[in-house]
Image (tube, grey):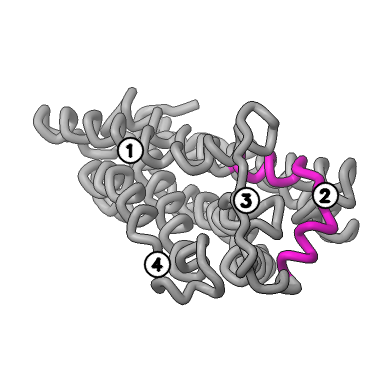
Amino acid sequence: MSTRTSDPGLSRGRRISVRVLAGLGLVTYSLLFAFVAAETSGIVTSSPVGSPDDPLPSPEALAGAAAPGEAVHLVGALGVLALGASGLIALLLGPHRLGASRQVLAAVLAFLVAVPIVGNPDNVGGQAGAVDPVLLVLGVPPLLAALVAGPFRAVGSDPLRPLPLILAAVAIPIAASWGVGQALNQRNTFPPTADPHHQAHWQAMAVFAFAVVLVLAAAAFAGSGWRLGATMAGMCAMAFGVTTIVAPTAASAAEPIWAVAALVWGVAVLYAAWSDKPRADGRR
């Protein structure tokens, strides 16, 4: 998947630091989304406890209760794991990989963008705080792993890949709008006990929407291992499209036209990743 490039090496100390941070980051990044995946698949269950003083369900809570299917949420949680964890594993194996450091940075940024939109997911409308500080803490180790690996080193040493960048640009307004909607659904659901998807399910979908586009955009700037992020983005989009078509009444399922668009877009992303030819000097 990767060939020799002009990416500069890292000192032994930085390689060790990247591996330690990537290992820790793999754990913290995966915690929330692994829980969502386990819960949506039925591996674990949570028992929300209501109160007689709970307010009447919000429109968001009622909408969530009206679409109890978890298939799309499962794909979203697994997709976020694939987009971020694969990059962290790549950094563990090769701390020098520019593409992996940029992939991880993009995935963590997607997570951090969603956090303030969601607010504190266990309160009415986020009034307990603009962000949940625990979620910010979870994002610190993978962010440090990406930064120590040096995602901005060797800028310009590899050519910009226009097709992945164009595909990312086309998807940005759609993914951003849909992702913000999912995050606000998490924020505005009250009481939490009224929504069967409240345990960060909507948040996972918001991160999924942001991460697919940002990871692909990062891959457009090349660096060794860049195909991993592009491939993950394409496969995640295809999985979302197929699942939405198969389970159109599940929570977070898109309209059929957008499901087909996601599927086609994912195929185009895979084509962009694997049709790219190595240069005459052997660099990709």
Q: Which residues are magenta?
A: 60-79
Q: Which residue is mark 2?
A: 250
**How many C-alpha atoms fall within 10 Å of the one at disc 1: few (<14), some, or many (≥20)?**
many
Q: Which residue is mark 1?
A: 25
Mark 1–mark 3 Cα distance, whole angstroms, equals 21 Å
Front residue of 229 and 276: 229
Whether residue 164 is visible to the viewer of this picture, yes or no, is no
**How many C-alpha atoms fall within 10 Å of the one at disc 3: few (<14), some, or many (≥20)?**
many
> Circle 4 sits in a helix, a strand or a loop, which is it?
loop
Q: Could you tell me residue 227's position as x and y percent?
A: 52, 37
Main secondary structure along the magenta-highlighted residues: helix
| Of callouts 1 and 3, the N-terminal one | 1
Q: Could you tell me residue 246's position as x and y percent?
A: 89, 41
Whether residue 201 is visible to the viewer of this picture, yes or no, is yes
| Of callouts 2 and 4, the N-terminal one | 4
Q: Could you tell me residue 104's position as x and y percent?
A: 40, 45
Question: Does the stretch in magenta take in 130?
Answer: no
Name the residue: 55% across, 55% down: 207
Q: How many marks?
A: 4
Q: Amino acid under label 4?
A: Val
Reply above or below: 93 against 200: above
Q: Which residue is mark 4?
A: 131
User: Relative to residue 159, is residue 251 drawn left or right?
Assistant: right
Q: Amino acid under label 1?
A: Gly
| Of callouts 4 and 3, the N-terminal one | 4
Q: Which mark is residue 147?
A: none
Name the residue: 75% across, 73% down: 59
Q: Which mark is residue 201?
A: 3
Q: Amino acid under label 3?
A: His
